[in-house]
Every structure is written in structure tokens, then in C-alpha cells.
Amino acid sequence: MRISVIGCGYLGAVHAACMAKLGHTVVGIDVDERKIAELSAAKAPFYEPELEELLEDVQQTGTLTFTTDIAAAAGSDVHFICVGTPQKKGENGADLTYVDSAVENLLPHLRPGNLIVGKSTVPVGTASRLAAVLLDREPEAHLVWNPEFLREGHAVSDTLHPDRFVYGVEDGAEHHPSVAVLDDVYAIPLSTGTPRLVTDLPTAELVKTAANSFLATKISFINAMAELCDAAGADVTRLADAIGLDDRIGRKFLNAGIGFGGGCLPKDIRAFMARAGELGADQALTFLREVDAINMRRRSRVVELTRELCGDGLLGKRITVLGAAFKPESDDVRDSPALSIAAQLQLQGAVVTVSDPKALANAARRFPELHYVQDVDSALQNADAVLLLTEWREYRDLDPHLLAKSVATPRILDGRNVLDPAKWRAAGWQYRGLGRP
Ligand code: UDX
């Protein structure tokens, strides 16, 4: 099929490359010229495992091109909307400017029978509103909402082998003409038995926000347990192992630590609360306020623990923060708890050095006042305390004996509870986890 993908960020660039991999002829469109130039040269504009290899692979076949010209969408059968929906400035709601303008700019290039497929995460009700616009301007085209569930760091495999497809269509009916078209687009993954659910438009939009709210709640639940474990002298990692063995609960997403961040979970739960308020159902989501509050409390807790760890306050203390990205295998620093903690420590008088295998350039753009050192050994020289805040494999594998020789004082705060406390203590370190005795 001929496919256009509008918006080539973390979602769209991966989606465009994966659709070409599935055998379609794809044009990726974005207003950002630098991004388009990089993608055209088979370079990923951000770090995502497997993406660059995939871009090289499919561009050799000539079935994937990139452009800034929206007119290139003409001639495609299916148009995916993959633009961002960031949090509005100073408000909890989602900013829909990019979605609205993507659809508006696409309208003149549509032909009867075309499909617009929304993938961006939007407040419930957006798809019906856009469907009404489409009905007015190109009544023979259709709109579908087909949310993505991909995780950064696994975006390529999550797109090629998703755990489910959700198609939101106007009447929610299996025989809606758009269903067969999307089935053709996803023929390869569907052929392996991937579940596919057809719903109405608002249900499809809600599936995405409900899934992210559940994940955020799971993380804040275990972080609340970590607070309790700290107060009672218990170990939250063993607690998670034990409750996780109940398969109604499950062990995944029960890692207590510095909390969730990134471009999705924090803004999605806030936009969800804002939308519930508009719909007069705000009471249903007041618990998400608590989920958000528990999550943000993690950051101040780590600052306090670092102060305790340093003994006599933060002023002038040399602190090395390992990790700037919001999670490993990503260079994304949007709402990164690691970077937010580093910045708070610096504001309170510490001399902070941040290291990260991939995210330093993005981090430096956001917080230019922090000191960045790529090489871990150099970053650790003469540190008064070390904070492990993003659990990259290379940090988990650090040798406490070797490291003890570089730092001024061997003190470590394990913000992700991924190190073996006994091993680090045996190597002479003062070890502090979160919710661990
Ligand atoms: C998330 C959803 O998983 C995905 O389905 C959705 O489409 C987009 O948002 P992503 O933002 O890539 O994906 O990150 P995810 O792997 O979900 O992690 C989110 C945050 O939670 C990270 O900061 C991570 O460090 C944190 N986390 C995750 C924990 O603190 N503990 C856990 O046990 C798991």
C-alpha cells in the first residue's frame, strides 16, 4: 500500500520505517528540516536501538522517503497522524495544535476512499471532532483511531510485533470499510495471531490513556510501598518479588525507585485528569492526582537522602549523577526524574557532574548549568557521593572495588534499586537504596 506518515518524532520515524519494512511504500513528512535531512540520509535524529539499521535496510529498497512537503501525501491510501501532543504551557491539558494542523494541512491532498489513521495520544472526543471535520470536507474519506503502545528503547520491535491492535472506527463495527484497509496495512503482524480489537472512537482513545494511567499507578503504588518500607525498616524489592508472584498482580512495573518520567506517562495522566474535568467526571480520576504526587515526591526524597548521605549538607559537595535519560536505551530527557534531581541538587549548592551514555547533548540543552562528562571514570573522579539514577547496563555492571579508588568518599545512592547492597558494602561503600534497609 502507499502510506504517508505525518510527524517523524519518536513515534512517526519508527512507524514510517516499520511500515516500509512490512512492504509498503512510505513517505514520512515533518516540518523540521534537520530531522528530514537526517532521516533521508538513513540517520536516526534520536537514539533508538535498531532504528538506524532499519532505516538503512529499507532505504536501499527505495520504498521509504522523507520530505517537508505535505503535498507528498497525495497519492497515499493511508495517512498516519504521528505528531506530538505535549502538555499545554501552564495547564494540565494536552496541546492539540499539531494534530489539528496536521489534519487541516492534509485535507487538500485527500482522495475519496483515503484513510486518516490517528496514532497520537489525544484527549477522548478528539477523534469524533476530527471525523466531523472530515465528513464536511472529504465525505468519502474515513478516520480511524489506532493508538500506539510502543515503549522507547523497544520502539522498533514493539511496532513490528505489537501485543495488540486497537482500531477505533465511527460505528465501532467490525464490518466498517476501514477495518479491512488497516488489516491490509498490518497483514504481516496479524498473520502471527496478534489480537485485534475493533471499538468505537472514544473507546480507542481511552484505551491508550487508561493503559498509561494503569502503568503510572502501578509504579506509584510500589513507590508508596517504598515510603512505607523506609518507615518500617522493610525491603521493597523483596516485597515486590513476593507480591509479584501472584499472577493477578505480576512483577513487571513494580520496580520502586525515583519514579516515572518521559514524554508520555506524566503528561498523559495530567491530560486525562483535565479531560475528565471537562466531561464532568473529575471524581473518577482524583486518584491520579495522588499517583502524580507520589511520583514527584520521589525526586525530593532523593535530594533529602543525598543530603543525609553527605553527612553535613550539600553545599560544595561533588556529586556524580549516573544517568540523565528518563530510562535506559533512550536519549530522551523529557521530564526525566534523573535530570530533575541533578538540577535540584545543583540549586541547593552541590557541584553536580552528570554522565550518560546517550543523553548528554539533550540534557545540556535543557539544563546548560550542569556539568556533563561522558566518560564514567572521569565523571567519578573525587566524587563525594555517587547517585545511580538511570539503570543503564554499564552502570549496573560497575565494579565497586575499582570505583572506590576513583571517588573521594565511597557513598552511593541507588535510585533504581538495581545494585547488590551486600557486594557494594563489602567493597567499602556506604550504600543507600530506596525503600531498602
Ligand atoms: C510508556 C508506555 O509503556 C507505552 O506503552 C506508551 O505508549 C508510552 O509510554 P515509555 O514512556 O517509553 O512508554 O516508558 P516506560 O517503559 O513505560 O517507562 C516509563 C517510566 O517509568 C520510566 O521513567 C521508567 O524508568 C519508569 N519505571 C518503569 C519505573 O520507575 N518502575 C518500573 O517498574 C517501570
Image: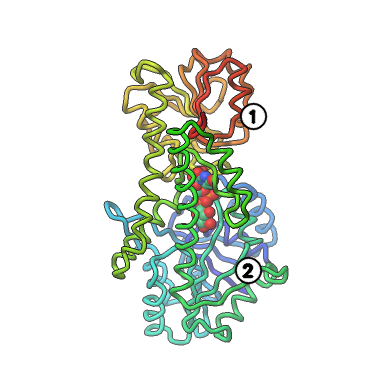
Considering only vertical position in the picture, is 213 above or below 25? above
Foreground tag (1 vs 2): 1
Q: Secondary structure at mark 2?
A: strand
- For label 2, the residue is 25
Rendering coords of residue 164 (x, y %): 61, 66
| Measured Cα–Cα span from mark 1 to mark 2 | 43 Å
Q: Amino acid at mark 2?
A: Thr
Rendering coords of residue 123 (x, y %): 38, 66
Q: Is residue 57 left or right of residue 166?
A: right
Rendering coords of residue 146 (x, y %): 52, 70
Callout count: 2
Q: Residue drawn 43% across and 21% down?
A: 309
The picture quadrant where one finds residue 195 is bottom right
- For label 1, the residue is 397
Q: Amino acid at mark 1?
A: Asp
Q: Secondary structure at mark 1?
A: loop
Rendering coords of residue 217 (x, y %): 45, 53
- Density class for disc 2 (Cα within 10 Å; few <14, some 14-19, many ≥20) is many
